[in-house]
């Protein structure tokens, strides 16, 4: 009978900026220009994904560090989300024989939804400007957005992930 | 009046929000959804979260938006800091040492990067170094983030050399960055806030944060030196920070002056804060019909604060209408001048 190799997840380390906050960890993916927020459980799993630690050891570490009654299902839930956010180096195959618990099952096991691992993508707030009172028009000149001389059919708006201003088609 | 009320709600949330331990939440959550929306729109979402976290308001559904803004600004600050270091490296390689201004520089007066967001990278360079600096960052991506200023227009009433000589050094990732000294920074944020019509409450919290951080070594004489009109503007901005955001100014020599604000100033600022700022289509596109032109002019009618600044008027109790009219005429003239130049991007294209 063929046995599957143990899953040894490895976290991505390149092109990432990590900023820990008091109760969560923020990760910016420079390659994809996306930001993620990992709650304490997900961050605890991610930090230990060193390519040498197996799923059962990760679960044990969670029990110890986060003081939750985590089992392998909790770790798998975290890994699935980390994988989806492309924060792991390679895909970690879920063992075919393993039972995939639902979130509801896991909340029942953990006793609280707050302990569930969560990886969420952070979207830009609809700030009309983190800043700039100035923006670059099609003529390459910077000036207040309200005065930006866009040609007919265009209007000055903030564009792009950096909230820069520019002339965009009406 | 409706705008003023909304502005007052924003002021209540932001009161003391720049402090490491903000004051206890003592305001009602009336129209909380709209308040949150305005905070986020004006870039003060992170500050709003800093103020209300741990209070009863934290549990309200709308507050999630503030927390998300705080998260976004926190991680973006790290990204931006990396980019600033890269830009400074490029400048240093050609012997240019710019001053980092506004957003990143001002964020040092706040307890955390996530509460004071910044978008672009503002750099002051000496005029004679400007061309070289432009070349140095020409192929930096994203280029539109970098705003290279020839000197500092808001501090044009004082010698540029003094601004550079009094600069502070601050670590920015792996490099040392030069930022304006606290006195210059305060004068700059005050003038900048009013010159732009006081529309962002975040800019007034910058004023408050710097004033409260001013210790015994803060040189108030130097800070208040320069053109009389701009110094008046500085005093008014500090007075607004005290009156609207509860900034502590007892340790400053401005206690008496900052209490006497022109009667039109506070309502004007509150009404700016409470109003949604729609992005205006290019004025040239409105010229096709008189009705649209009038509507476009109305939308662009300058507020009393910015017209006082742009016409270099005194901050006193005299009516503001003359300054507003003068400002409007000057802008219109400038627009028509640009329009008259064939090939100008403002030139209205015929309908297809």
Image (tube, coloured by chain):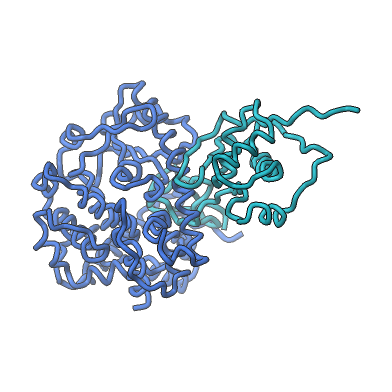
Chain colours: A cyan, B blue
In the rendered picture of this protein, how many numbered marks are placed on residues?
0
Tell me where residue B293 appears, x and y as whole percent.
43, 69
Write down the quadrant of residue A12 in the picture. top right
Task: Looking at the picture, tell me which residue is in the foreground, B261 or B214.
Answer: B214
Q: Residue at x 88, y 27 (%)?
A: A2
Q: Residue at x 56, y 34 (%)?
A: A47
Write down the quadrant of residue B327 in the picture. bottom left
Tell me where residue B352 appears, x and y as whole percent.
61, 59
Classify B338 as above or below B31.
above
Q: Quadrant of the N terminus of chain B?
A: bottom left
Residue B203 horizontal side relative to residue A28, left or right = left
Q: Is residue A101 visible?
A: yes
Task: Looking at the picture, tell me which residue is in the foreground, A153 or B58.
Answer: B58
Q: Residue at x 48, y 47 (%)?
A: A23
Q: Residue furthest bottom?
A: B1
Q: Residue at x 9, y 63 (%)?
A: B256
Tell me where residue A40 appears, x and y as whole percent.
54, 45
Residue A141 horizontal side relative to residue B190, left or right = right
Write down the quadrant of residue B162 in the picture. top left
Q: Is residue B332 visible?
A: no
Residue A66 horizontal side relative to residue B328, left or right = right
Task: Looking at the picture, tell me which residue is in the foreground, A108 or A137.
Answer: A108
Tell me where residue B8 appears, x and y as whole percent.
32, 70
Classify A144 as above or below A34.
below
Q: Residue furthest right?
A: A1
Classify B4 as above or below B112.
below
Classify A48 as above or below B3.
above
């Amino acid at each position: 009978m063929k046995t599957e190799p143990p899953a040894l997840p490895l976290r991505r380390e390149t092109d990432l900026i990590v900023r820990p906050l008091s109760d969560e960890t923020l990760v910016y993916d420079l390659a994809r220009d996306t930001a993620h927020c990992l709650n304490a459980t997900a961050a605890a799993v991610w930090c230990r994904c060193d390519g040498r630690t197996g799923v059962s050891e990760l679960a044990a570490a969670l029990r110890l560090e986060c003081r939750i009654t985590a089992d392998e299902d909790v770790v798998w839930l975290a890994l699935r989300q980390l994988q989806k956010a492309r924060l792991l180096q390679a895909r970690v195959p879920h063992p075919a024989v393993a039972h995939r618990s639902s979130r509801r099952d896991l909340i029942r096991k953990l006793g609280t939804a707050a302990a569930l691992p969560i990886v969420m993508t952070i979207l830009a707030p609809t700030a009309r400007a983190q800043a700039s009172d100035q923006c670059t028009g099609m003529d390459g000149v910077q000036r207040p957005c309200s005065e930006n001389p866009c040609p007919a059919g265009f209007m000055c708006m903030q564009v792009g992930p950096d909230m820069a201003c520019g002339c965009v088609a009406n | 009046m409706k705008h003023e009320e909304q502005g007052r709600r924003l002021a209540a949330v932001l009161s003391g929000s720049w402090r490491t331990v903000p004051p206890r939440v003592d305001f009602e959550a009336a129209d909380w959804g709209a308040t949150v929306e305005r905070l986020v729109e004006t870039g003060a979402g992170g500050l709003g979260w800093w103020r209300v976290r741990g209070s009863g308001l934290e549990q309200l559904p709308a507050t999630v938006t503030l927390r998300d803004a705080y998260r976004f600004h926190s991680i973006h600050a790290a990204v931006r800091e990396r980019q600033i270091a890269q830009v400074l490296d490029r400048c240093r390689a050609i012997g240019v040492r710019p001053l980092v201004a506004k957003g990143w520089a001002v964020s040092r007066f706040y307890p955390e990067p996530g509460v004071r967001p910044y978008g672009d990278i503002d750099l002051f360079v000496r005029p004679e170094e400007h061309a070289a600096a432009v070349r140095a960052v020409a192929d930096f991506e994203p280029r539109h983030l970098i705003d290279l200023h020839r000197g500092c227009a808001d501090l044009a009433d004082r010698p540029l050399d003094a601004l550079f000589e009094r600069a502070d050094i601050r670590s920015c990732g792996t490099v040392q960055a030069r930022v304006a000294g606290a006195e210059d920074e305060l004068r700059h944020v005050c003038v900048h806030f009013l010159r732009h019509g006081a529309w962002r409450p975040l800019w007034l919290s910058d004023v408050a944060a710097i004033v409260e951080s001013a210790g015994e070594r803060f040189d108030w004489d130097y800070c208040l030196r320069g053109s009389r009109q701009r110094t008046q503007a500085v005093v008014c901005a500090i007075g607004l920070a005290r009156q609207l955001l509860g900034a502590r100014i007892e340790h400053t020599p401005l206690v008496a002056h900052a209490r006497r604000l022109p009667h039109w100033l506070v309502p004007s600022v509150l009404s700016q804060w409470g109003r949604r700022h729609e992005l205006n289509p290019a004025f040239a596109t409105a010229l096709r019909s008189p009705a649209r032109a009038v509507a476009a002019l109305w939308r662009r009618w300058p507020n009393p604060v910015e017209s006082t600044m742009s016409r270099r008027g005194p901050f006193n109790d005299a009516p503001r209408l003359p300054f507003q009219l003068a400002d409007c005429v000057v802008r219109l003239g400038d627009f028509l001048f640009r329009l008259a130049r064939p090939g100008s991007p403002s030139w209205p294209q015929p309908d297809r």
